[in-house]
């Protein structure tokens, strides 16, 4: 039986830099840590925008602001279908002192040309670059 879940990604931008968070993935692999943008699963009764703002607050200790939807995706994870929505967001404070959640072991503010150095998922990079190119036009 197939089940469905909604995954939310918040690509947090301040000026021309983007927040990436380093978190533990799995001790059984060579590098058990991974860099990602802020993300979460949609909880029952929550809108996608509320989920993104919740994830930003939990990850950084700061309120966020949704700027616009960036892109959507879908894929199968075994017999579960994941539907994803990525938002471009910013923080309410322009000079934040981040209070990164304990599930993360680091953070960086990176430029767009550093995405491929940090983000391993080539589909995220492709979708994100396409969405941000539209902003530049």
Image: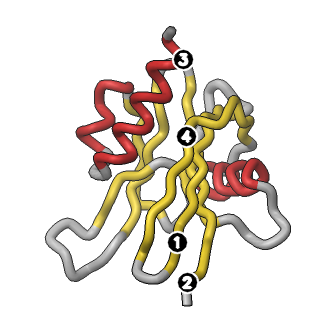
* Residue carrying label 3: 135
Residue at 55% x, 83% y is 2
Give residue 2's mark. Answer: 2
Query: Foreground residue, 125 or 82?
Result: 82
Upstream in sequence: badge 3 or badge 1 = 1
Numbered disc in front, either 3 or 1:
1
**Labelled pair 2, 1 in contact (Cβ < 8 Å):** yes
Q: Which residue is mark 1?
A: 81
Classify mark 1: helix, strand or loop. strand
Q: Say whether residue 105 is left or right of residue 98.
A: left
Label 3 to label 1, Cα distance in Å?
Answer: 29 Å
CA separation in Å, label 2 and label 4 = 24 Å
Give residue 68's position: percent from left, percent from top: 68, 32
Residue 102 horizontal/vertical position (percent): 53, 66
* Disc 3 and disc 2 in contact, CB within 8 angstroms: no
Please identify the residue farthest to the right as the structure is shown: 45
Q: How far apart, in angstroms, are the residues tagged by discs 1 and 4?
A: 17 Å
* Label located before the other in sequence (2 or 1): 2
């Amino acid at each position: 039986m197939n089940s469905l879940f909604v995954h939310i990604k918040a690509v947090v931008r301040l000026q021309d830099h983007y927040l990436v968070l380093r978190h533990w993935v799995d001790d059984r692999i060579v590098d058990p840590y991974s860099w990602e943008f802020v993300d979460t699963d949609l909880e029952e009764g929550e809108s996608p925008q509320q989920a993104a703002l919740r994830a930003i607050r939990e990850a950084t200790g700061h309120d966020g602001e949704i700027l616009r939807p960036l892109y959507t995706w879908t894929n199968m994870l075994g017999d579960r279908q994941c539907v994803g929505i990525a938002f471009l967001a910013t923080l309410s404070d322009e000079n934040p002192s981040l209070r990164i959640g304990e599930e993360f072991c680091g953070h960086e503010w990176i430029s767009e040309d550093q995405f491929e150095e940090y983000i391993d998922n080539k589909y995220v990079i492709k979708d994100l670059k396409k969405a941000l190119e539209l902003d530049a036009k």
